Image (cartoon, helix red, strand yellow):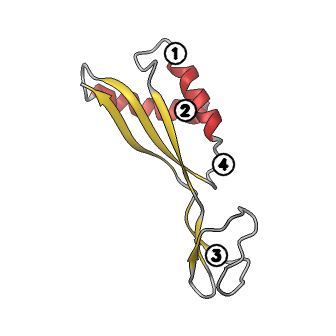
């Protein structure tokens, strides 16, 4: 709920710059390692926008997969598991650099003028 409230605060600040506009949709990128449950985030959004001028707006969540670079051979790959990330090229299981999957970010805002 607190993450949804933080997103709401950012959106309200942006909406102040667009007087008379109404919010239709917010698109959020949720990394697989961010620790945020997408369904809980959308539920939280619906709950906190009830009775506000943002009621009826949609929070769309795009899942961002984990992408790592092998610490040994530098091969970049998308592991199928969050815990076991053996490199498909050299077999190294630990020591990889996470390139994506930890982020939680607002990707876009759709408004009606």
For the C terminus, the quadrant is top left
Give the crowd class for mark 1: few <14, some 14-19, many >=20 residues within 10 Å.
few
Q: Which residue is mark 2?
A: 4
Where disc 1 sits, the SS reads loop
Q: Mark 3 or mark 1: which comes first in sequence?
A: 1
Give the crowd class for mark 3: few <14, some 14-19, many >=20 residues within 10 Å.
many
User: How far apart are labels 4 and 3 at the CA level?
Assistant: 19 Å
At 72% from the left edge and 63% from the top edge, which residue is drawn?
A: 81
Q: Is residue 39 above or below residue 52?
A: below
User: Which mark is nearer the camera, 2 or 1?
Assistant: 1
Q: Is residue 46 above or below residue 33?
A: above
At 61% from the left edge and 51% from the top edge, which residue is drawn?
A: 34
Q: Nearer the viewer, residue 111 or 17?
A: 111
Q: Which residue is mark 4?
A: 35
Q: Is residue 30 above or below residue 60?
A: below
Give the crowd class for mark 2: few <14, some 14-19, many >=20 residues within 10 Å.
some
Give the crowd class for mark 4: few <14, some 14-19, many >=20 residues within 10 Å.
few
At 61% from the left edge and 80% from the top edge, which residue is drawn?
A: 70
Contact? badges 2 and 4 (CB < 8 Å): no
Q: Is residue 2 above or below residue 47?
A: below
Q: Which residue is mark 1?
A: 50
- Where residue 27 appears, as percent x and y from the top left, is 44, 40
User: How far apart are labels 2 and 4 at the CA level?
Assistant: 14 Å
Q: Mark 2 or mark 1: which comes first in sequence?
A: 2
Q: Quadrant of residue 36?
A: top right
Q: Which residue is mark 3?
A: 96
User: How far apart are labels 3 and 1 at the CA level?
Assistant: 43 Å
Where disc 2 sits, the SS reads helix
Q: Mark 2 or mark 4: which comes first in sequence?
A: 2
Q: Quadrant of residue 73?
A: bottom right
Left or right: 14, with 82 as reference point? left
Q: Mark 4 or mark 3: which comes first in sequence?
A: 4
């Amino acid at each position: 709920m607190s993450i949804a409230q933080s997103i709401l605060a950012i959106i309200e600040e942006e909406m102040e710059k667009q007087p008379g506009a109404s919010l239709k949709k917010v698109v959020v990128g949720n990394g697989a390692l961010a620790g945020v449950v997408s369904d809980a985030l959308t539920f939280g959004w619906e709950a906190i926008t009830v009775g506000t001028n943002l009621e009826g707006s949609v929070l769309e969540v795009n899942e961002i997969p984990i992408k790592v670079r092998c610490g040994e051979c530098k091969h970049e790959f998308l592991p199928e598991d969050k815990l076991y990330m053996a490199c498909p090229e050299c077999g190294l299981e630990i020591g990889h650099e996470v390139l994506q999957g930890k982020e939680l970010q607002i990707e876009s805002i759709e408004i009606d003028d």
